[in-house]
Image (spheres, coloured by chain):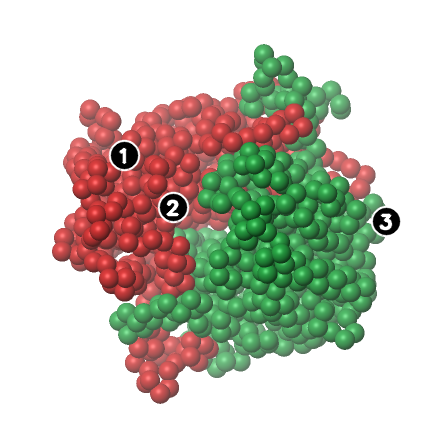
Chain colours: A red, B green
Amino acid sequence: MQFQDFSSFKAVARLALLAREPHDLTTVDGLSAQRIREFKVSASGFDLLYGTQRITPEVLSALQDLADESGLINTFKAMKQGAVLNRIEGYACENRQVLHTASRDIFEEAPGSPDATTKAKIELTKLNAFLNDIGSGRVVNAKGQTFTTMVQVGIGGSDLGPRALYLALKAYSLPGRSARFIANVDPDDVAEVLLGLDISRTLFNIVSKTGTTLETLTNESLVRAALIKEGLDPARHLVAVTGEGSPMDDASRYRATFYMYDYIGGRYSATSMVGVVTLGFALGYAAIIEILRGAHEIDRSAEQRDIRKNIPLLMAMLGIWNHNFLGHATIAVLPYSQALARFPAHLQQCDMESNGKSVTRQGESVGWQTGPVVWGEPGTNGQHAFYQLLHQGTEIVPVEFIGFRQNQYGLDLEVEGTSSQQKLVANMLAQSLALALGKRDDNPARCFSGNRPNSVLITDQLSPRSMGALLAIFEHRITFQGFCWNINSFDQEGVQLGKVLATKLLQLLATASQDHPEKLDQECLEKILLQQAQMM
Amino acid sequence: MQFQDFSSFKAVARLALLAREPHDLTTVDGLSAQRIREFKVSASGFDLLYGTQRITPEVLSALQDLADESGLINTFKAMKQGAVLNRIEGYACENRQVLHTASRDIFEEAPGSPDATTKAKIELTKLNAFLNDIGSGRVVNAKGQTFTTMVQVGIGGSDLGPRALYLALKAYSLPGRSARFIANVDPDDVAEVLLGLDISRTLFNIVSKTGTTLETLTNESLVRAALIKEGLDPARHLVAVTGEGSPMDDASRYRATFYMYDYIGGRYSATSMVGVVTLGFALGYAAIIEILRGAHEIDRSAEQRDIRKNIPLLMAMLGIWNHNFLGHATIAVLPYSQALARFPAHLQQCDMESNGKSVTRQGESVGWQTGPVVWGEPGTNGQHAFYQLLHQGTEIVPVEFIGFRQNQYGLDLEVEGTSSQQKLVANMLAQSLALALGKRDDNPARCFSGNRPNSVLITDQLSPRSMGALLAIFEHRITFQGFCWNINSFDQEGVQLGKVLATKLLQLLATASQDHPEKLDQECLEKILLQQAQMM
């Protein structure tokens, strides 16, 4: 496992040449039926259609070379086996393993990192017992009533992934069970969630790896105060997901505690206890095992060297082609499924926090672009909104479409000869073609330049298993890109400076006199800037 | 009112020179207390702090010249007075006035466009009567019960703005009233919303200007079927917002009908009947008048020529500086308020659909960048997610922060000497400084390059009035930019091609035999591509 500068690879020089004249999708033969059939990968029930990318067989071959030269598959396998990949050589850093795949290796006789998988199994067993106790009425409120709602209190990685997955799979909820989420330190976030709840039948799941996250501890205080106000015992209503030995690892304050480990980063933690406790409460234990199974299938298929067989690897290399060689600054993830409404926000975190870096693994400044801006909203909604810019704007935005052949609830109706689900998928496919093909017109405002790269990822239905697979596809797409760019995708040093300055501002407020409270305003900023200037 | 190419302005040449060495915020005097105090505009209760932009007094002066040279204020005034600004010279186009401000001119003795304002008043009077009838129990269900929920069925402009405003102001809901929204043609969107409702006490508000929107009509069919299934009369439960004389303008099918006019584009329609019917149901008539009042105050203050007094004009010019001269492809809107969770999605539509254009008002290709990619999520959540890239990524993302000094619900708690609301605002101000100042460190992974441009828009509280103002600030920011770029911000030709191709795909499906139903897949795409090829 060796890391080398992105700019030093032979394939990079070749790709830069090929990018001078990228494939033109708008000519007569630019996008043929044949091309659609040929540029397709299938794995674990998913098809990736990528004929609508601006690539040729030569580009694909150079991307394969880049994947090989940069040793992506070897590094990926080493990651699964516990290599210390969360580090920068020669500098203080987290210096940790990267083992989110270990929580999915439970199906393997010989898992990549046996200790981590054993720990994952222990927590799953604890969780299964706890869920059984809730179901059977052994875990109840003070009046002996069952719990109907779990509210997850966490932020960032302890919020976005679990929330996105819950919304995606809400259709599969156990009868009478639901989940809610509180993240923001904004007190109105807590207020709004509590307003809609029967708090006496609610469990609060407080999630923080370090047990010190400002927002989460503050919101835990608000929740405890609300329980006490209703005459309820917080220790009966709170459970914790935290690191072993953290300040939150305290059985006197939580009804149950599940552990997370430092080798799973927050943004990769949806399949650890961070995600599966609340998902297990709402969907049942069997569903979370299916999520893990789907993710595990992709963990396995992502080990293949051939980019024409490996969906996340191919998506990673197509992303690098669009970003580093064709120069597109952003990427849109557009799911044609309302249930995936928050999945782009999760990926925005996972991708931008992983690959929004400027320093190599050797501590040098990068001389190439790293992670793009990731954003997106569900289709068809976006078609009536920002798609205008996708089709005719001066910024070119590569698109990753996600679609499903069947819906979840089974409530559908034929209107004018087709069902809503057919309309949904037909619209996605039509957008993919329209972006690629473009259209000439005598009216300049009705011209479409086309050549807007995109691909379509499609499977039968959004289920616990396919959701797990989808999550893993994007996790590995992101991770492969980080390896290729020679950056550490697993730290987040960029969040520190804001924390330091916020703490200073809060000290200013806390020490202000009651008679002259500080107004949070430019005067506050001025004082902080004067402090900073004095320190220089 | 004259439109000229962006590249032809003298100020553009001067700004291009100034952009070679933009102001450095990271030097000892780069960002002083004095600078924070000086670079501040106040209007209608809002402060805009923009000392953290990479500008000098010379840049500001050149931006003022650009605003003057491009005649932005004159064009803006002409727009309010009914000029036909939705057009491309010499080509088929919508050829319409642009009068979303007219629905807010109801407070003026001499409104800019008297006819449009009179029509707006007529609809408001109808709405007030209808809301009174709901409140007094004259408009009830078949059992004589009052209605508790209104579900708005619309998409794009008939969804995003009203939805964002409802979430923003939900804290002010009338007792026992709530609103929901259905937009996506995905049948699971309808299913999920209907599942959580007492449909017998629900009004459905069907919103489509043309009365022909595919998604909305399809979802209306699903809603009608659901009502009939429950033994309810759809004509008793449905109201319509549509154009006069549209296929939906049919009193036999809707309990009440409110009109929208072709001089208000969907994405600018939140303060027309498109928004205020559902908002009025949920929040009451007085609240919507306050929304209109807040918007109107900004409509007035946006007429000032001086960019140091005009918040939307200054924001527009700062955006042009960051996008066209400093070369940043995207802009993030980051509200520090959970209630504004969907406001960035509304702005994404309003901005990208308005300014994602490549053709001038004279039908020529633009030779400069038009609208950026707009995206965002609430803080502090984002700080634990994509802020890593904002601080340390290779893509520079200018930021528009939005904050409030007080919360909405009044549920708050001091933890470690400060309230949650103070923590929220302090974090926003800290992020603004951190992005601008950066930080040196011996550990390269802990260095922050700084110089990441941003501004802070802050007011006392998110209320109906300030929400109206906030909406108008961004509407005019977007419109001023479109005028300056010499594009038509009011059409949306870019949505047509996808519609045409989707219709072809749906025809393919509708005519497929029952024995061999088409699988929505690459084979469908192949067939369409073969059809296209035969047409060439």
Position of B206 with respect to A109 (left or right) is right
Badge 3 marks a residue whose secondary structure is loop
The Cα–Cα distance between marks 1 and 2, rounded to whole angstroms, is 17 Å
Badge 2 marks a residue whose secondary structure is helix
Quadrant of the image occupied by residue A452: top right
Q: Which residue is mark 3?
A: B90
Q: Which residue is mark 1?
A: A285
Q: Amino acid at mark 2?
A: Arg
Residue B154 location in percent, x, y? Answer: 62, 46
Q: Amino acid at mark 3?
A: Gly
Q: Which residue is mark 2?
A: A163
CB within 8 Å, label 1 to label 3: no
State whether residue A245 appears in this view.
no
Above-or-below relation of B531 to A14: above
Parent chain of label 1: A
State whether residue B183 appears in this view.
yes
Query: Residue at 21% across / 37% down in the picture?
Result: A136
- Say which of marks 1 and 3 sits in front: 1
CB within 8 Å, label 1 to label 2: no
The Cα–Cα distance between marks 3 and 2, rounded to whole angstroms, is 51 Å
The Cα–Cα distance between marks 1 and 3, rounded to whole angstroms, is 64 Å
Query: Residue at 36% across / 30% down in the picture?
Result: A465
Position of B110 with respect to A387 (left or right) is right
Q: For the C terminus of chain B, which image quadrant?
A: top right
Query: Residue at 56% across / 67% down in the picture?
Result: B464
Position of B306 with respect to A344 (left or right) is right
- Badge 3: how crowded within 10 Å, few (<14), some, or many (20+)? few
Residue B340 location in percent, x, y? Answer: 49, 59
Q: Nearer the viewer, residue B473 or B244?
A: B244
Q: Amino acid at mark 1?
A: Tyr
- Badge 1: how crowded within 10 Å, few (<14), some, or many (20+)? some
